[in-house]
Image (cartoon, helix red, strand yellow):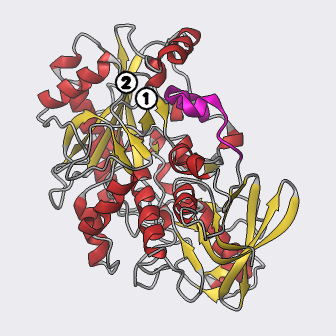
Amino acid sequence: MDYDYIVVGAGSAGSVMAARLSENRSNRVLLLEAGGSDWHPFIHMPAGLAKLVSLERINWSYSTEPEPELDNRRLYWPRGKVLGGSSSINAMCYCRGHRKDYDDWAEDGCTGWDFDHVLPWFKKSEDQGRGPSEYHGAAGPLKVQDLRYHNPLSDVFIEAAQQAGHSPTDDFNGAHQRGFGFYQVTQNNGRRCSTATGFLNPAKERENLTVITHALAEQILFSGLRATGVRARVKGRTREFRGGEVLLCGGALNSPQLLMLSGIGPADHLRETGIDVRLDLPGVGRNLQDHLDVCTLVRCRQPITYDKLFEPLVGIRYLLTRGGPGSSNIAEAGGFIVSRHAEDDRPDIQMHFVPALLDDHGRNRLEGHGMTIHACNLRPTSRGYLTLASADPAAAPLMYANYLTTEYDRTMMIECARQARLIFGQEAFAPFRGEEIHPGSDVTTDEDIMAFVRRKAESIYHPVGTCTMGQGSEAVVNEALQVYGTEALRVVDASVMPSLVSGNTNAPTIMIAEKCAAEMTR
């Protein structure tokens, strides 16, 4: 046996797992990553995220299959293909969700995953710039800080939200989630703090940790139903690595893909794809969930947005000071709303404000200056699934998100658009507000808004659930994240979430890895 642990995927969870497991110098740990190193400067300069959307060498650049309820469009799903994974290309918003999200997990059979049990692992990972508190830690590897710079329009947005009847907040991760304010970000003095930066880089010097990049995992190796290693293609050459335990950290798309490539998943689908069935596990690839997002775009009558920045000057200022617009995460402010449709006191709508025109993930550049409010339904009831395109490990999986297949989800997306319009219509925006670009002033009825949603709604990049933790018929892993019916095999990433949390998914994914690593090494 070459290694004690083989971690597949050096993303938000995998970097944490490799770093924590290698803290014990008697553990021999191998980390395999399909992408390359995180050398690109746009990764580390926060505002560079606007450029990452088109850099396919660090982005899987997935798309769903045609979505029937969204005019049969293929929705773009960026995923990090680089050390740090999606934590190296995301907008750095640090959000945990609502306490009841985790209490629901526990009530549904995930013992030990209620909020009181997961809070210590959120705190362990965190180095909170404001210092420690009941809800925050200040000794972890993940830097969580206030933005060093923000656009004045972000202040206007928060003021307008208060005029619309919403309360202000200075901490979305404290005692009360609801309200509007500035996001804290995973940054260290104006630089992105991905899990590669915070967790993995300090661990790389350990002799017991081996990191191999450009290593595409092709199959889990087994002896019977016990995982014994991984076959991977490393820079064009097939290699086999042996280990005592295999940990899949490829995320909600690649972890179920690798399980199925290895013969673990829905038996009929595996046979249809030409893969020998090792274990019929029907839940692999099922329960796919994502936050669908609708953007309201309004022109700005004053040239203070991020649309026409002189990029060389921004870059020079950032290099000299680690401040200015280059240190912005672009989605600087936001909020959580409890709408009239909410079933409990949890917010059911999240907003991100962007002081720029953002259309089609920033890939469609619009002329002029403007502002954007992203709004998403936090707890969708639609469920999708993922399958293999073929037995070729290099082929992208097929994603069927099945957005808007329930009446509740359609109602909530209309509510999202109306709430964004309500905020843009407040007095605080009066000196800046120009014409509405999307949905457009002629879009007024629920039917019109729904047509707009079908035409323009996009993912906000939070896929989860495809290797669900729990005890039901579609469960894939138990509360220790061990794959049912196997030995020495776990899944540790966002795919194990039974349901979406009420917010961004990066911090919860890091928490999942922290909790799993700690419990494995007790």
Where is residue 521 drawn, in percent x and y?
48, 73
In screen coordinates, is 366 left or right of 124? right
Residue on which the image places disc 2: 148
**In the rendered structure, which amino acid carries the disc numbered 2?**
Arg
Counting from the top left corner in percent of width and height, residue 263 is at 69, 81
Label 1 Cα crowd, 10 Å radius (few <14 / some 14-19 / many 20+): some
Observer able to see residue 75: no
Q: Are marks 2 and 1 in contact (CB under 8 Å)?
A: yes
Q: Amino acid at mark 1?
A: Asn
Q: Which quadrant holds residue 244? A: bottom right
Q: Secondary structure of the magenta portion, mostly?
A: helix
Q: Left or right of 149: which side holds 116?
A: left
Above or below for 357 versus 164:
above
Examine the structure image and report whether residue 46 is included in the region drawn in magenta: yes
x and y, in percent, of residue 468 in the image: 46, 73
Query: Which disc is residue 189 wearing?
Result: 1
Answer whether residue 95 is visible to the viewer in this image.
yes
Residue at 43% x, 14% y is: 369
Specify whether residue 485 is painted magenta.
no
Residue 362 location, x and y as percent? 53, 30
Give the residue furthest to the bottom: 224
**Left or right, residue 224 beside residue 482:** right
Nearer the observer: mark 2 or 1; the answer is: 1
Q: Which residues are magenta?
A: 36-52
Decide which of 254, 63 is in the foreground and name it.
254
Camera-nearest residue between 439 and 321: 321
